[in-house]
Image (cartoon, helix red, strand yellow):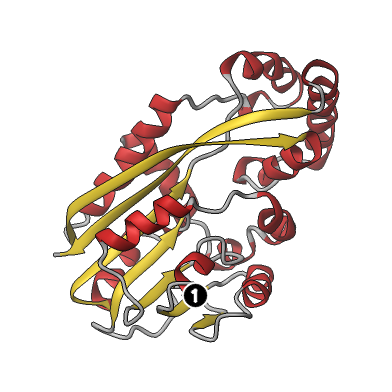
Amino acid sequence: MEDLKQTIISYSSRELEQRKNWYSPAAEAYNKVRPRYREDLIHQAMEVAQLSTDSKILEVGCGPATATVAFAQLGCSMICLEPNPDFFRLAQQNCQPYPNVEIQNTSFEEWTLKTSEFDAVLAASSFHWIPPEIGYPKAANALHESGYLILLWNKELQPPYEVYQRLSRIYQLYAPSLDRYENRETQEEILRGLGEMAIDSGKFKDLISGQFLSEVTYNVDEYLMLLNTYSPYLKLDSHSKEALFAGLRHTIEDDFGGSLHLSYISAFHIFKKL
């Protein structure tokens, strides 16, 4: 749990301007290859949070609208905040068919609080980018008395362990700091920690969680594009990244027929306002 807190602090303590532009180099790739949220996960989350066409949702850090569209299709009224200018543009494009969605190019920190106005505050793999001392109290204040905080997560996509072991050799050569594998137990432990952090804030109660194991197949181009959307790869110097990706491409094409079967956990955490 302490390691998780330190990791989250490392994201949320960056200067706001840096956080706003962090994903710009990978915005198009993020929109193309990051997995959407499973339909059954979304439906379950909507049921738990008692959302209907009359509900008003505030989404924090909507990215390119990865989860937004699924909620917009229900007919909910949505205000979605996205500080990154490239994500903001993509979110506007992706939400064009939904007049019930308003995208604002601002951060949650800078957004002018509308107190007790929303039935739900939604964040899809984004809440860890906001300092906890700001995020949880402000989310609670935006909700009316019986409102819910909905946190959605898609954990990092992982190959089978025996495939990882082959790829690990390439990481050891070019980027040993990125040589890390998350099995299902590890991903579940991280998710438990993320749920506990919201309860520990003292602003929320009655955690209800759900999760699904998802499986996908990516070709080598999609897989390398996906890796480039994860923060540790965005930080990697261009020379190391070029050598790493060339090595990974060679191994995936030669040993695995040019594609990888991947799995990951999709999950929701839903809390009542305290």
Residue 222 image offset from top left, x and y in percent: 75, 42
Residue 24, by quadrant, is bottom right
- Total numbered labels: 1
- The answer to whether one can see residue 250 in this image is yes
Pick the front one: 74 or 136:
74
Determine whether, in the image, residue 34 is placed left or right of residue 76: right
Residue 93, by quadrant, is bottom right
Q: Residue at x 49, y 50 (%)?
A: 38
Pick the front one: 47 or 151:
47
* Element under disc 1: strand
- The answer to whether one can see residue 200 in this image is no
Determine whether, in the image, residue 40 is placed left or right of residue 209: right
How many C-alpha atoms fall within 10 Å of the one at disc 1: few (<14), some, or many (≥20)? Answer: many
In the rendered view, tell whether residue 75 sits above or below residue 259. Answer: below
Residue 211 image offset from top left, x and y in percent: 37, 41
| Type of the residue with mark 1 | Leu
In the rendered view, tell whether residue 118 sits above or below residue 22. Answer: below
Determine whether, in the image, residue 219 is placed left or right of residue 58: right
Q: Residue at x 79, y 24 (%)?
A: 252
Q: Residue at x 19, y 62 (%)?
A: 272
Quadrant showing the C terminus? bottom left
**Residue that label 1 marks:** 81
Quadrant showing the N terminus? top left
Residue 117 image offset from top left, x and y in percent: 28, 84
Residue 97, by quadrant, is bottom right
